[in-house]
Each structure stands twice: as structure tokens, then as C-alpha cells.
Amino acid sequence: MKSKLYRDPALRYVFLMNNGRYILQKIKGSTEINDTMGAKWCRKRSTDLRQYHKGYTRETWSRLLQCLNHEGLQVNGKVVKPVLKERFKMFNSMFDEIHKTQSTWVVATSSFNLSFGFRCQQWLFRLTGHFWGASSSTCRRVDKRRKSSSWGYYVPAVRGMIGSDPLERVVRLASESAVVIFSISSCCMCHAVKSLFCGMGVNPTVYELDQDPTGKEIERALMRLLGNYSSPVPVVFIGGKLIGAMDRVMASHINGTLVPLLKEAGALWL
């Protein structure tokens, strides 16, 4: 088989998926050929495609599971914050390595690219979401004084702006630093996005809305900006531009556009 020509097992599975999907679509698109091959043959090929996708997932992303292992993460029922940060650094390093390799691959079928990329994002969201959810206790137990030194610039309250329009306030604050995160100190997803940026060597300005007397107003303003989101935090701005909530940040990280945005804003130099 031609797939044997590829040394990288993950690329071999991508080749099999792309070609198998193309053949299956062509057969299903022709009534005559579809009747000749039969429904049983089509079901068998669909099963093969799912197996190829599982093979790709195993070959590519199994290394990342080492970073998201819960073993050694807790001591006496409490999450060890330095260990958690180290896990995120390992995740970023391994992910960058995968991205550098696989971003050079060329697949001519654009529809396959979109479908395949979306499936990878879904898998990573589920995996990282489970890990962040399991480690959420660290967000609630970290001492407030330590938080100020953990993140780049910790701003406990937005002073001197009470009475001004909340939306204008958000825009103004977002434009004052290269990376701005609106957060709630007890939110595990907020902690995860802050850890992500710190692990990349970025020093974000963090506004903890639960420690701000006008925090509720800012939350409502953020919800107006985001649209149909159940939670207004975390919200990330880079270079004064709205990136969005956690899903948008992770999608940018996965598709390789996050680092260029950070470099353009002057938040990342290397």
C-alpha cells in the first residue's frame, strides 16, 4: 500500500483517512456504483475510517496524555500549583512540537482539512477540559497574596472608573496592556487560561472581577461583547483586540494563530 511509504505513522493514517473518505464519497455519490458495492461494503469502509482516525489520535496525541496525568498532582487532597504549572509547560512544549511537524503536511482536499481539524479541536477540548475540571480546586485554595505574584500583572480592582460606561471601561482596560484577561478568582477555566499564557512566557494583566466593586457591571458588558455565552469569563484581549472566551483561545492555540498574535502585540519576543 502507498501508505507504507510514509515513515510517520500519524501521516500514514491521515493518508488513509483522506483517500478512504474520497473513495467512499465518490461511491455514495453514484447510485449505480453504490448499488453495486452494497450498503454492507459502505458500512465496512466507514468503520475503517473510524479506525484510521483512532490510529492517528493514538500516534499523535498520546504523548500529551502524559502532561495531563493526575498522578502526583495532589497532595493531601490539594492540587500542588507548581506541579500543575509544569504540566502546562510540558503540554505547550509537546503541542508546539506536534504543530511544527504537522503544519507542514499538505492535504489537497479542503473539506477533509476542515472536518479533520474540527475533530482534533473537539478531542483536545474534551481532554483538557476534563483535566482542568479535575484540578479546579487549586483555583479556590490559592492564597490571594500569592496570586499577585503568580500572574504577570494582577489588578484586584478597577479603581477610579466607577460611574463610567462599563463597555467603555472594558475597551479602555483592554487597550492598556498587550494581553488582558478578565477573570474570576474561583473559576477553574480562568485559572487554566492564565496558566496557559504564563506557560508560554507571557505576562498578562489580570482583572479579577469578583474582587472589583464594579465587577458585575463589567461581567454584563463582557456578555454583550461575547453574545450567546453562558459565562462571561475568562475573556482574553490581545493587543486591544477581543480574542474571546476559553474555546476561542484554545482554538487559536491549536491552529497556530495565537503565537503570531502575541508577537504582533509585543507580548512575546521569541
Image (spheres, grey):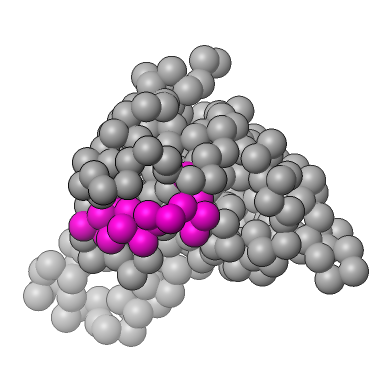
Please report the residue visible at 33 percent of the width from the left and 70 percent of the height from the top. Answer: 230
Q: Is residue 200 left or right of residue 17?
A: right
Please report the residue visible at 44 percent of the width from the left and 32 percent of the height from the top. Answer: 179
Q: Position of residue 57 (x, y in %)?
A: 55, 57
Please report the residue visible at 37 percent of the width from the left and 72 percent of the height from the top. Answer: 46
Segment colored magenta:
207-224
Q: Position of residue 206 (x, y in %)?
A: 50, 41
**Vertical arrangement, residue 268 with respect to residue 173, above or below:** above
Please report the residue visible at 57 percent of the width from the left and 57 percent of the height from the top. Answer: 185
Q: Position of residue 23 (x, y in %)?
A: 27, 59
Residue nearest the observer in this picture, 28 or 146: 146
Residue nearest the observer in this picture, 123 or 9: 123
Asked where in the image residue 96 lies, by quadrant, the reply is top right
Q: Main secondary structure of the magenta part?
A: helix
Q: Can residue 176 be seen?
A: yes
Q: Is residue 99 left or right of residue 65?
A: left
Q: Can residue 11 be seen?
A: no
